[in-house]
Image (cartoon, grey):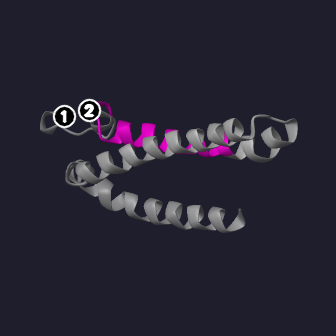
């Protein structure tokens, strides 16, 4: 967990260090979102599909056993649900960034969408 938090911290520092460069030119974020739109859409789709596979794997494991115990739900179920909600949240975030609502949030001209 500490390794993941270090990666997240490094990514956050990188983003915060580059925010002033985007703020200097209002259209830089808009151009970045527009140029990365196919990648954002692909990642969004993969996040939603990944969330579905996480739930499917979880359910199939319980169907295959034929029984569900409290220990199974504690050990495996919580992690799977957290993974599902993380992937689903990433999908929702990417959907917002690539939409007209996300463009208007970044004060972009929404005509290019």
8 magenta-colored: no
The foreground one among 71 and 105 is: 71
Q: CA distance from mark 1 to mark 2?
A: 6 Å
Left-right relation of 16 to 67: left
Residue under numbered circle 2: 100
Q: Give SS at disc 1.
A: helix
Left-right relation of 56 to 107: right
Q: Which residues are magenta?
A: 80-101
Q: Crowdedness of circle 1 by 10 Å Cα count: few (<14), some, many (20+)? A: few
The foreground one among 51 and 102 is: 51
Q: Is residue 36 visible?
A: yes
- In the figure, residue 2 lies in which quadrant? bottom right
In the rendering, at what x and y percent does residue 48 appear? 44, 41
96 magenta-colored: yes
Q: Quadrant of the C terminus?
A: top left
In the rendering, at what x and y percent does residue 60 appear? 63, 40
Q: Crowdedness of circle 2 by 10 Å Cα count: few (<14), some, many (20+)? A: some
Residue furthest left in the image: 111
Residue drawn at x 71%, y 62% as measured from the top left: 1
Principal secondary structure, stretch drawn in magenta:
helix
Mark earlier in primary sequence (1, 2): 2
Q: Is residue 85 visible?
A: no
Residue drawn at x 44%, y 60% as measured from the top left: 15
Vertical placement of 111 versus 90: above or below?
above
Q: Are marks 1 and 2 in contact (CB under 8 Å)?
A: yes
Q: How many marks on residues? A: 2
Left-right relation of 79 to 8: right
- In the figure, residue 111 lies in which quadrant? top left
Residue under numbered circle 1: 110
The foreground one among 38 and 65 is: 65
């Amino acid at each position: 967990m500490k390794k993941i938090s270090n990666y997240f911290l490094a990514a956050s520092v990188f983003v915060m260090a580059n925010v002033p460069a985007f703020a200097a030119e209002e259209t830089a974020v808009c151009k970045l979102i527009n140029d990365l739109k196919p990648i954002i859409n692909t990642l969004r789709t993969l996040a939603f599909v990944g969330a579905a596979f996480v739930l499917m794997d979880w359910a199939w494991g319980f169907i295959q056993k034929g029984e569900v115990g409290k220990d199974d739900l504690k050990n495996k179920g919580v992690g799977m649900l957290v993974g599902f909600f993380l992937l689903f949240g990433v999908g929702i975030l990417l959907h917002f960034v690539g939409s007209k609502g996300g463009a208007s949030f970044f004060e972009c001209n929404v005509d290019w969408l």
